[in-house]
Image (tube, rainbow, N blue to C red):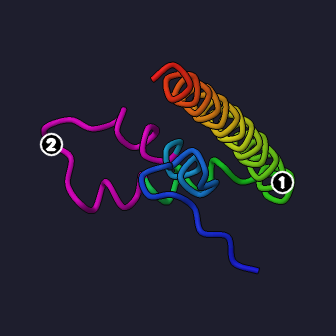
Amino acid sequence: EVLYTPLYHCDLQPIEMVWSQVKGEVGRQYDVSTTMQLVHQRLVKAFEKLGGDTTGRVERLYEHVHQIELEYMRMDEDDSDEASEDCRESEESENESDLKG
């Protein structure tokens, strides 16, 4: 099954969290004398620095994203419930107006 995520929601993309760490590491080393070769070397080092328990890190990232998804779904359900309540109130108000009218 393919799950499509909304556009521009990097918090739902685990790879974006990894990329954020790497970019931060490389970006903090930038100065006016930085060359593309240095950027490449720093990228390699930053990815190596991530190393260690890659499987555990990926599992934690996916669990983190799953919790965010659940929160979005809960908010969506709350919005849907609120919209349904607003619709019912509007219908009741219209029915009362019709009875008075």
- The mark nearer the N terminus, 2 or 1, is 2
Dominant secondary structure, magenta: helix
- For this orientation, the residue located farthest to the bottom is 1
Horizontal and vertical percent for residue 75? 67, 34
Residue placed most toward the observer, 38 or 98: 98
Q: Give me the residue at 30% from left, 54% from top.
A: 38
Q: Quadrant of the C terminus?
A: top left
Horizontal and vertical percent for residue 61? 74, 48
Foreground tag (2 vs 1) = 1
Q: Which residue is mark 2?
A: 33
The image shows residue 81, relative to residue 99, as above or below, that is below
State the SS at label 1: helix
Q: Give me the residue at 58% from left, 35% from top.
A: 87
The reply to whether callout 2 and callout 1 are in contact (CB within 8 Å) is no
Answer few, some or many: residues within 10 Å of disc 1's Cα (few below 14, many 20 plus, some between 14 and 19): few
Q: Give me the residue at 71% from left, 46% from top.
A: 69
Would you say residue 7 sits in the magenta stretch? no
Q: Give me the residue at 21% from left, 46% from top.
A: 34
Span colored in magenta: 22-42
Type of the residue with mark 1: Glu
Q: Which residue is mark 1?
A: 59
Horizontal and vertical percent for residue 33? 15, 42
